[in-house]
Amino acid sequence: MRILIIEDEQSSADRLRRMTESEHEIVDVCASNAEVKAFFSGGAQREVDLILSDIQLGDGLSFESLREVPTSIPVIFTTAYDHYAVQAFRFNSIDYLLKPIDSEELHAALAKVKPIVGSVSTTEAIAQLLESVKNQNIRYRERFLIPHRAEDFLIIPVSEVSHITIRDGVVRLCLLSGKHYTLNMTLEEVEGQLDPQRFMRVNRQYIVSAAAVQKLSTYFLGKMRIHMAVSPEEEIIVSKDKVATVKRWLDS
């Protein structure tokens, strides 16, 4: 099959390519809704049998560009978030995979889609999915309940959070006040519960709040350093592949 990948993180796009290119042709990789619209503006849908698409792009949800594509190309969504209306991904053979993508699950999804390539219409399904997401009252975490001393608990609103980091296997919640507390959660669990418009996982060790970012500065080899208002001495480094995504997020 001829596959179009929609993914704004270069490392994730490269991984999908490695997992599929031995058996399928990768037509192109688009990193934004703007690139998706540009790709299809010249009738490129005739060159694509299947789309593998991330949901949360730097310039919005991929549904926004996909629903405008007049095509019958099946879509398999890839996402790190399970609070979208995942049951709606089943419309008209649309499927979804949760990140990190498992190779066996990916190939099973590809095998399921292959027999119906060219025989389904996904445009209406994507429109329904977008409407479902808009109508759904998605609730993100608003506060953390932190054990404190013997039998007490602290209630910490997410608005007071500067960043969340993991060190030596321990996840720490760092506040704008400079205080920090241990969380009995994985960084992946925390990431999935926070509003992606307000928080972003900028590398393997850090989730940062946009409101707490003080400035950005260039770093070696095309990388970028994030300076936080709290703990400005911490070196929070963004890889070259993710620099554009972080900039779009902070500029939104």
Image (cartoon, rainbow, N blue to C red):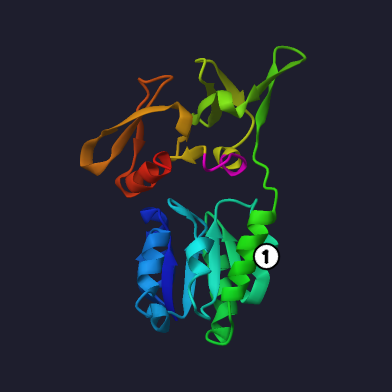
User: Residue 158 at what x, y percent from top left?
Assistant: 60, 29
Q: Which residue lies furthest to the left in this view?
A: 221
**Residue sitting nearer the eye, 248 or 225:** 248
Magenta-highlighted residues: 191-197
Q: What residue appears at the point 63 percent right and 52 percent down from the top-left corner? A: 82
Q: Quadrant of the C terminus?
A: top left
Say what amino acid the circle numbered 1 marks.
Ala
**What is the crowding at mark 1: few (fewer than 14 residues within 10 Å), some, or many (at least 20)?**
some
Where 245 sits versus 141, above or below? below
- Image quadrant of residue 186? top right
Where 87 sits versus 107, above or below? above
Within the magenta stretch, is there residue 120?
no
Can residue 163 be seen?
yes
Q: Left or right of 48: which side holds 89?
A: right
- Image quadrant of residue 215? top left
User: Residue 140 at what x, y percent from top left?
Assistant: 64, 40
Pointer 1 residue? 88
Within the magenta stretch, is there residue 193?
yes
Q: What residue appears at the point 69 percent right and 53 percent down from the top-left corner? A: 136
User: Residue 129 at what x, y percent from top left?
Assistant: 63, 64
User: Residue 225 at what x, y percent from top left?
Assistant: 31, 33
Tell me how many marks there are: 1
Label 1, secondary structure: give it.
Answer: helix
**Residue sitting nearer the eye, 231 or 38:** 38
**Residue sitting nearer the eye, 59 or 1:** 59
